[in-house]
Image (tube, grey):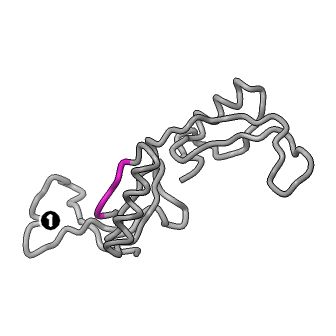
Amino acid sequence: MSSGQSCGLDSSLPQNPLVYAPPNQCYQGNLANYYIDVRQPSDIQAGLAFANSTGIPLTIKNSGHDYKGRSAGAGSLALWTHNLQQPITLTNGFVPEGCSASVGNGVTVGAGQGFKAVYEFAEANGITVVGGSSPTVGISG
């Protein structure tokens, strides 16, 4: 779904409309054509139903981009999960499925949470969470 198409700008005068006026064309680049601002799980279900019925590909976006480019795609429907702020939870003595003993404490986060909120939660609970260096980066899609 990647596209090298874009909309050129005049670097000396960015508001210059002659750069993209006909016969020139201004493309949206690799951005999704449609977005759903996900606020609840039913928004995701509606997006999946729409994509299935129309054949439009899905992309998932939290706070920005994905290193491999999976958060963008020309012609796609983007599920923007940044506003899906499920509570962060701590499980003392977390036992992973299939294990018989605890591996320590576990933190559960949902889509939309950024590292800032997770680091603040960890600090308040006396635990360590290893992650990115930028607090604005989303911890999951």
Residue 83 as seen in the image, left or right of residue 66 = left
Disc 1 on helix, strand or loop? helix
Residue 20 as seen in the image, left or right of residue 49 = left
Residue 130 as seen in the image, left or right of residue 7 = right
Above or below 78: residue 75: below
Residue 106 as seen in the image, left or right of residue 121 = right
Q: Residue furthest top?
A: 124
Give the percent coordinates (x, y) of residue 13: 17, 53
Q: Which residue is mark 1?
A: 19
**Is residue 88 a member of the stretch shown in magenta?**
no
Q: How many marks?
A: 1
Please name the residue shown 70% across and 24% down the image.
124
Q: Quadrant of the N terminus?
A: bottom left
Q: Which quarter of the picture shows residue 67?
A: bottom right
Give the percent coordinates (x, y) of residue 114: 55, 41
Give the percent coordinates (x, y) of residue 41: 46, 48
Residue bounds of the magenta highlight: 33-37
Above or below 111: residue 72: below
Give the percent coordinates (x, y) of residue 87: 58, 34
Check disc 1 and give the amino acid type. Val
Please name the residue shown 39% across and 68% down the image.
73
Q: Which quarter of the picture shows residue 52?
A: bottom left
